[in-house]
Amino acid sequence: MAFRAVHAAWGDVFAHLPDLGCGQVWEAVWKRRPPAPLTCDECQHPMFAKVSRTGLRFFAHAPAAPNCALALETLAHHMLKLELANAARDAGAHAEMEVRGPDGAWRADVLASDPGGTWRMALEAQLAPIAADDITARTERMGADGVTSIWFSDRPPPPPWLGVVPSVRLAQPEDGENLIIASGLVKLGPCGCGDPGCRDSSWQPVPATLVQFLGWVFAGSIVPYGERYYICTMPDGSPVWSDPRYIWTAPRYIAEYEDEMQRHQRREVALLQGRTKWMPRWKRKP
């Protein structure tokens, strides 16, 4: 199953677009005799247009197809790709599905871009298990060609790779409407410890639909941030930080968070030097 194929005369055609992305109608490729000259962009094997029982339009490989990556993808993966493409368009971007990079080094599930061509961003649906090193390598390959990326999963619980690369987890709301962000989008707020003198803060989830999230991303209102927790200061004065985990937030919250982490570091250095009896709140006895 795929939503993209290559027509011998028209070039790329997209099953999910009303005009196939090339000014043609679906009937021009569906149930044609002889079959429309369609091939897979990935393996170049012949394809034909199909419609599911629920009315979903797609392209399928003809019999005797090779082991093509597109042919092995699940229906759930294809449906999430379609959701990402539609949300990207609703957020004001141009979006193409199943786009290959130069020399086939990578393939984006959905390639979103500014209508003016100033940026490109891959929206990746990742439902199958994947190692942290592998998803990082795929992100870096796209980045080498000037394509940033966001990885999406709608599987509970959160997959282990969530936060290793810029990513969020999606969920279907109870009303069954637009997908929402379940985790990965945050803002900085009070820690909620109840101490009126406490200046600490914590990351708090921000409710948003997928369309809202992408709109903020495309506008630069939120950015991926490799959050690191300050752990301690070594006797030589060097700080120890946790490994980064990516979240999405507004730049002003990043500045506030980094100021707070630096404040914790300065206080612990002062403690080590014997100038104060302050200690992190989590170390204090009740």
Image (cartoon, helix red, strand yellow):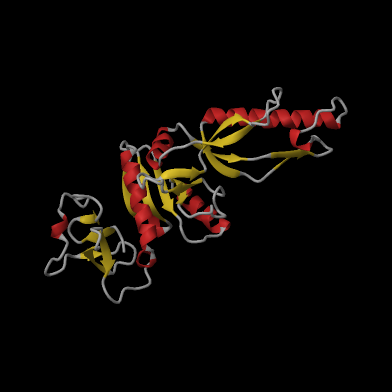
Image quarter for residue 228? top right
* Residue 190: percent from left, percent from top: 62, 29
* Residue 241: percent from left, percent from top: 70, 41
* Residue 97: percent from left, percent from top: 33, 52
Residue extending furthest bottom? 64
Q: Is residue 232 above or below residue 75?
A: above
Q: Residue at x 51, y 61 (%)?
A: 129
Give the left or right position of residue 32, taking residue 155 as reference.
left
Q: Is residue 273 above or below residue 77?
A: above
Of the 4 image quadrants, the one containing the N terminus is: bottom left
Residue extending furthest top? 197
Q: Residue at x 36, y 62 (%)?
A: 75
Image quarter for residue 62? bottom left
Q: Is residue 138 visible?
A: yes
Q: Nearer the viewer, residue 253 or 43?
A: 253
Give the left or right position of residue 254, taking residue 262 as reference.
left
Give the left or right position of residue 227, taking residue 4 as reference.
right
Q: Residue at x 54, y 50 (%)?
A: 162
Residue extending furthest left? 33
Q: Is residue 101 visible?
A: no
* Residue 205: percent from left, percent from top: 53, 37
Q: Is residue 132 above or below residue 229?
A: below
Q: Residue at x 31, y 42 (%)?
A: 89
Q: Nearer the viewer, residue 104 or 273?
A: 273
Of the 4 image quadrants, the one containing the C terminus is: top right
